[in-house]
Image (cartoon, grey):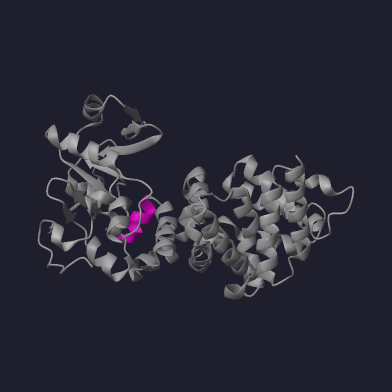
Amino acid sequence: MFGFLKKRSKGPVVYERAKHCISRKDIDPDALKVLYRLNALGYTAYLVGGGVRDLLLGRKPKDFDVGTSATPNEVKRAFRNCFLIGRRFRLAHIRFGEKVIETATFRRNSQTVGEIIEHAAEGPFEDNTFGTPETDAYRRDFTVNGLFYNIKDFSVIDWVGGMKDLEGKVIRSIGDPEIRFREDPVRMMRAIKFSSRLGFRIERKTAAAMKKLHACILTAAVPRVCEEVFRLFPYGCSEEAFRQMYACGLLGDLLPDLAKFIDSDGGKKSSTFNYLRVLDEYERMMSAKGFEVSNGLRAAVLLTGLFRRERKDGAGRKVMQTLHGALKTPKSVYFTGVLLMESMKRLAQPPCRGKQRFVHNRDFLDALDYNRIILRAEGKSEKTLDEWADLYESKGTKE
């Protein structure tokens, strides 16, 4: 797919256009505008990161990010539609309507060439230290995310062995994984996200470092951890992602009650993974229709096993509090999760007179889908849910 990988020299391996599958027609036209303009002004500008990875895999990237030798202020002067954000590291957001092409100046940190050992005890450099394409490649998390696309000659530039790992379907840390995970523990969750989403295996040393250092996740900023937890759900890969979270110890660190439940519920055969498997099917179906699943529904499915075990009034609040307390989830996620769990009892009964008002609740459709997910995972009849769905349709027709 990527052509013959040459033996790596001191410089990068450069794959000419004939050696890779990226075509300009698959790149966002506004990202092309940014690349062309920065190059025309004399700056180096590459398409970088996950966008390059996904294009090489034949996937449609969600975002197209640009790396450049231009400083943030120079990028701002080049584009009237540019806004600078960030304190520790200034990023240029170039807006095209509601779309943003994120443009960052090449950076350097303690994981750049020749500095990994020298600066290991000192921690990362100040984020505002600009660098070169090489140092920027080495400061990235995993080799498959360290590839650059050069619009000037349509080549792919590889400083870190990312093309080889794409071919081998491997997630490998750039540099010493123990240093990288101590530097930023959230990278462990990102490894799992990419592994589950792409169907790649995590390389042995990287996986060993995760098992050794998983407790470091408790030192990471809670909002970032919360964000990464919910990034494990899209693309219909949550079952595999949470299996890996459980296996390496990260789930036990973040959600110990859930991990203990899984232990007591058969481990790898726990009902939690059955619920997530059906949720993944639902996620893929909704994505194909252009809809996004709410985080409240995702949280409720994840914790349903715990909820089923409680079997007490107020169990929904108690179970959702385990997630909210650990991750400081938005209140909307908490309250939606509680409502969905507690809708089980109501929707298990036919919609008799006096109990039909629930169809007007703004979360009714989520409740309907949540209950279908649980019933399908448990292999139970959906006949009563169909009655509720018919009632909803009839109410909508009359209104």
Asked if residue 327 lies left or right of residue 20, the reply is right
Q: Residue furthest right?
A: 353
The vertical placement of 161 against 48, above or below, is: below
Asked if residue 345 lies left or right of residue 367, the reply is right
- Please tell me in which quadrant of the rendered image residue 107 appears: top left
Residues in magenta? 176-183
Asked if residue 52 lies left or right of residue 12, the reply is right
Asked if residue 39 lies left or right of residue 212, the reply is left
- Please tell me in which quadrant of the rendered image residue 130 appears: top left
Q: Nearer the viewer, residue 140 or 287?
A: 287
Majority secondary structure in the magenta region: helix
Residue found 73% across the figure and 48% down from its top: 339
In x, y percent, where is residue 247?
A: 50, 69
Q: Count every numbered label the image shows and give the total.
A: 0
Residue 126 seen in the figure? no
In x, y percent, where is residue 33?
A: 23, 37
Residue 245 seen in the figure? yes
Q: Where is the N terminus found, in terms of image quarters? A: bottom left
Q: Is residue 58 within the magenta segment?
A: no
Q: Nearer the viewer, residue 63 or 124?
A: 63
